Amino acid sequence: MAHAVWSGSLSFGLVSLPVSLVTATESHTVHFHQIERGTSDRVRIRRVNESTGEEVPYDRIVKGYPTGDEYVIVEPEELDEITPGRSRTIDITGFACLEDIEPVYFDTTYFVAPRDKSHAKVYGLLHAALDRAGRAGIATMTMRQKEYLVALHAQGGVLVLHTLHWADEVRDPHRTLDNLPADRPAAQELRTAVQLIEAMAIDWDPHDYRDITQERVRELIEAKRSGATVPQGAPEPESTEPVDLMEALRASVDRVHGTKSADKGKQSKQGKRSKQSGRSKQSGQSDRSQRNQQSRRGQGDQRAQQDKQSKQDKRSKQDERDGQGRVGAKGRGGKRGSEAAAGDDLDRLSKAELYELAGRAGISGRSRMNRSELRRALAGSGGTRGAKKAS
């Protein structure tokens, strides 16, 4: 059993559940000691008094807040006293849709466990209820003398708790980032980019990926121990110039399709060789039977190729219609934005588009709103009319 980093009570309504938190992840980073060059002597960090140079025992260290030439001294016990009853309680104040919490707010993940078997029934009930409702409990808690905003939800048969950043800790990307695009991409470029994304679509499986950098670090250490050499990594790819963007997209789509076709052709050849090997071991089979089987296989391959081509043609026609629809919407002076801002069509807009409409409508505090809050603000404050005038 992993070591618990926090123990306390989980409170929702009038129900209190004693729980423990266990860190959900572990790091496999290769750690080094600091060594003085030319020696085998470790360099260590000690807590020393800057005036005397003498090392200070940990129990003699307190916290101090600078106020100019002096410090306000705060004892650890004083910090515990100002949060009575909260340092050991996860107090759920409501239940929200987990998908409404943007990924930028997530910080650290913990597994939640009942402290003993006598509380397993309450734990199982809360897990089943959260799983069926599809919601996450939003709560606050204190850990290591710091207050956290947390989200609790059911996942993989257990309760999982995420610490969240506070709203004022998340930067507004529109104020933080420079050189953001001001115009929409060209329809043809967008269509080709979407085709590339669809061609590279995969089913997510975290086991398909590994930390290559840490593997290379371990190889380097082992090579230096044995006197061998390790090849250097590949150089960083050059950035794509805007004038070459369309050509790079087309080449990428062709390469992905070519790789998949080669893989399918290789698998088909291997299957044919296996079938031919099996037929050669069978006795009493005539040449005419073999020719009939080959003919049927050829017809089947031809039909499969025709079906594949038909699907590609349908997809291309659909992409062209989508591109024409987007170009038409843009040519009509932002008609899509003004129509989507009315009624239920707000649900179809991304957060960035809702944020833009909120700016036109002059909605205050929009930089700290999530997508749902922006949608509600636009629907209830008359912001859609302002967006129509701006368009």
Image (cartoon, rainbow, N blue to C red):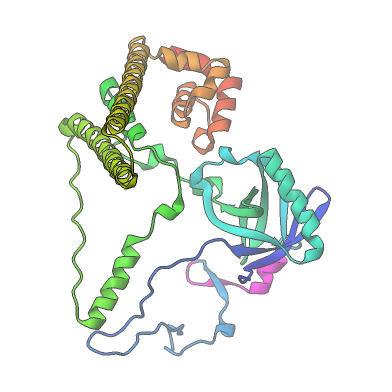
Taking 10 as reference, is 47 above or below it?
A: below
Would you say 188 lies left or right of 342 here? left
| Outermost residue to the top | 332
Q: Position of residue 328 (x, y in %)?
A: 34, 11
**What is the quadrant of the C terminus in the image?**
top left
Q: Position of residue 137 (x, y in %)?
A: 68, 46
Q: Residue at x 32, y 90 (%)?
A: 41
Would you say 80 lies left or right of 251 here? right
Is residue 48 found inside the magenta-colored segment of the image? no
Count of all numbered marks drawn on residues in the image: 0
364 or 348: nearer the viewer: 348
Where does the magenta region start and end?
68-82
User: Is any part of residue 88 visible from this angle?
Assistant: no
Taking 342 as reference, is 82 above or below it?
A: below
Q: Which quadrant of the structure image shows residue 284?
A: top left
172 or 244: nearer the viewer: 244
Is residue 72 found inside the magenta-colored segment of the image? yes
Q: Residue at x 75, y 53 (%)?
A: 124
342 or 261: nearer the viewer: 261
| Outermost residue to the front | 284
Taking 138 as reference, is 340 above or below it?
A: above
